[in-house]
Amino acid sequence: MLLAALVIMPLLGALAAYATVRGQRAWLLAVALLHLGLTGSAWLVPPAPAFDGWLALDALGLLVLSAVSLLFAVVALYVQSRATVGSAGRGFAAWLLTFLAAASLVAVSHHLALLWVGMEGTTLALAPLIFLRRDRRSLEAVWKYLVISSVGIALALLGTFFLATAQGDLAPGARPLVLEDLVAGAGGLHPVWLKAAFIFLLVGYGTKLGLAPMHTWKPDTYGEAPALVAALMAGGLTSCAFLGIARVSEVTAAAGLADFTRPPLVAFGLVSLAVAAAFVIGQSDVKRLLAYSSVEHVGLLVLGLGLGGAGAYGSVLHLVNNALAKGFVFLAVGTILAAGVGRAAGSLRAAPVSGMLLLVGLFAITGSPPFGMFLSEFTIVRAAWAGGHPWIAAVMLTLLALIFVGLAGTILELLFHSPPGQQPRVRESGWVVVGPAVLAAGVLLLGVAIPDPLQDALARAATALGGAAP
Amino acid sequence: MTLWTVVDLGVVLVLAPALTGVAARTKSLLTGRRGAPLLQPYRDLVRLWRKGAVYSTTTTWMFRFAPVAAVVTTFSATLLVPFDGQDAVIRFSGDFVALAGLLGLGRFTLILAALDTGSSFEGMGASRDATFATLVEPALFTSFIVLALVTGERSLSGMLGSGTTAAWGHAAPSLAMVAVSLFFVLLAEGSRVPVDDPATHLELTMIHEVAVLDHSGPDLALLLYGGALRFGLFAALPVGVLAARGTLPAPLGAAVLVLGSLVIAALVGVVESSMARLRLSRVPQFLVAATVLAALGVILQVLA
Amino acid sequence: MSLDRLADLLLLLVLLTGFLILGTTRLTTCIRGVAAQGALIGALPLVLQPHWTAHTVGLATGTIAIKAVVLPWFLTWAIREAAVRREVEPRVGYLASMALGVAAVAAASAVAARLPIPGEHSHLLVATSLSGVIMGLLVLATRAKALIQVVGYLMLENGIYIFGLTSLDRVPFLVEIGVLLDVFVGVFIMGIVVFHINREFDSLDSARLSELKD
């Protein structure tokens, strides 16, 4: 019942928020905290599978669910400040909660068609949120987003159909498209259909993830959407989309097709890193800059998955890090931009707390120690080295260094270079600061000392993906 | 080669003008008119034959030679087609290439004759005619390729004969595509709507008409007959694909040939009355569509 | 005619409508083509399964209703509302589009011939499905007009639906999930109408044409 509640409760909250215009922020916060509480209880008492195994929570799902839930709660806190959403219409809280419901569905569903429905739900729920400002540029952004994402979702559906075909005639008692039965019967799956399913699911969900070369919607969308929506997308949507790819990887790993699946994963990962490195340099719009950084990070996620071994552990750790880090960076940027501080120039003086958070965030998302991302990126590099692919490690390090240079160049200038004239000081209320600060602390914690329950979950997730904890 | 091969060839030679008459009559009836009598084309031929010819002073021997060449090449082409559903007068492996070549040669002499007049108007018509002829060739050849794949034969007599009858059992989709594609080829080679309007009197809309504009008297009679014979030949191709005559007794096969040709001619009349001629820049699309249909037939055949 | 033949005929007609959409110059012909495709596809479950269950009939009726009636009507309404010019504006010429379509069918058939087909379905089913997907992507990529891109998306969706039919007897509700893709189509059309998205943002202010780029 807990699992169903995780999905249904945000939906009900969305309806309530839509009905009450004035109280929608309150509803948003209440449901978000309730959801966070339920997720926390899932850590303490693992919930039983529901609906004949269609909904279940394994380690990987729990990690994604927690990341999304925590990020959403922080965003809900952030939204309480009136300055952040401006003149948004009556529906924005409802759409946010619908997104939460869909993302929860993706995290808890072990039936791969249901997972697809959840992904489609996230795509649809985000569209009105991207279009919050209702001007020409955001219209263009949301149109591009919808067209590219819908093609990706359609291809993912075809991949899901292929997976069903791979199952062929089912053994008695086997449930079609349920993860456990797919993994258990992996030896009996038609290899050709399974390979085709993997490719289509990788491309389809990869489009949602923002892997290059299907990333073209990302800069425009992240650039035009409000920062809090971009935070949810960079942290939440990417985690859900990665989960889609990870699920099919579990099946292919169990079927022994690792030699087939690894090269495409590594290829997409490296190409994403390269594209990010190329476009990050000289990018002056900070949200677009962060979009390319997001392309880099999802590239790392997929690269780690493709390297196997400790790389899978690195990927899962990176998933959590990415959700938290991107979350607070985008929210900090949002505060700075929302106060009308030009192109965030001179923000350290104008908005000291958020500016400091942005500075911290720069180091976090580029993988500097002692932050968590350093640990996950280092694990992936070590996996490349240990797996006998030293050149991959070398390329990775080069590209990461380039990305650091690009990001640092733009963000540092934005933070410190003040344009002439008096910069207005931004009023940073508690709402907009507390949440991001918590997330930043979380990323720091992950880099220094990972708590045991988390470590355990990470290890179990890595094992399911065909890897191992280092 | 049997007696019936020659008889069927004779039937086609005699019946060809009637087919154009049927097409014109059908079109008239469908557009609310009574139309010319069915045998009008014959009367036209006789009338023209009795007249004298007028030659422009700019023309040379090519202009006088072309009508004869056109009829002779078309007649030679008919010798290659198995009208009785089993055998043609002349058959050899790869004769479908010779068919296309002979028809092309006839068209070539007509184009030369048009250029011979020295008028730019005829030149324009000739160039358009040549362009469309070029675009029809792939459709024709692709259809033949499908037939060759389906029946395994390399000669027209085999491709349009009993092999096709048996092939309908397992290659029906491909053969259906080929039949439609050959119908489109008929519309193109016979200069019918939607490729060209044979009844137009506006100079700017003429394509094939331009090429024959300057001929008169017996020359024109020869050209009209050659055109009708070409129509009859191309009408017999889809009949050969669609109507399974391989196992029928010979007289019945001849009757099926006549009936099938008349049906195809009527169908052409229906198409002419229901569509307008395509814009000049759209005609290549139509011809490519014919090729695409035949190509689909190839793919479906190879897939199976 | 046996049911197998009827199914093959329907699939063949689906391929032909795909070519019609690739080769035509008129917007309304494209919409009629995709409506015809939807009707043919809706009839396919009835033909593929000799024993009709309530589920099969319901699926067929629903599919025909949505794909052949509602969505084409919606598209036609959008043409009137947004006052769209009736001519398709392709970036790749019609002849090249048709040639690419033939290449798509050839590639799809070649792939389908090598795949082990589930159940007793014919190779033509998988070939048509993959051809539909490729032709839909082709239309999406080579047409500049937003409404034609929606038509292309519908073709893509139809191709995926046909493939789903191979799992109809084993995983009953999989095919219905594909209908959820139609929700996207509805959203697109609404977007086009409400915001007058004509040609990828060419229509309104061409000075701000490609504002978003690096």
Image (cartoon, coloured by chain):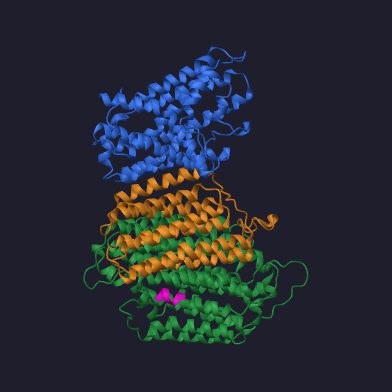
Q: Image quadrant of residue B55?
A: top right
For chain A, what colour was chosen? green
Q: Is residue A280 magenta?
A: no
Q: Is residue A148 above or below residue C53?
A: above
Pick the front one: C84 or C182: C84
Give the percent coordinates (x, y) of residue A51. 33, 80
Q: Which chain is blue?
A: B
Q: Is residue B34 left or right of residue C112?
A: right
Residue A234 spot, x, y in % from top left: 52, 69
Q: Position of residue B202 (x, y in %)?
A: 62, 33
Q: Does the magenta stretch mainly form a helix, a strand or a loop? A: helix
A163 over C114 or under it: above or below = below
Residue furthest right in the image: A421
- Residue A299 appears anywhere in the view: no
In the rendered structure, the colour chosen for chain C is orange
In the image, what residue occupies the spot 35% across and 48% down? C109
Front residue of B167/A187: it is B167
| Front-most of residues B219 and A290 | B219
User: Which residue is located at x 29 percent, y 44 percent?
Assistant: B171
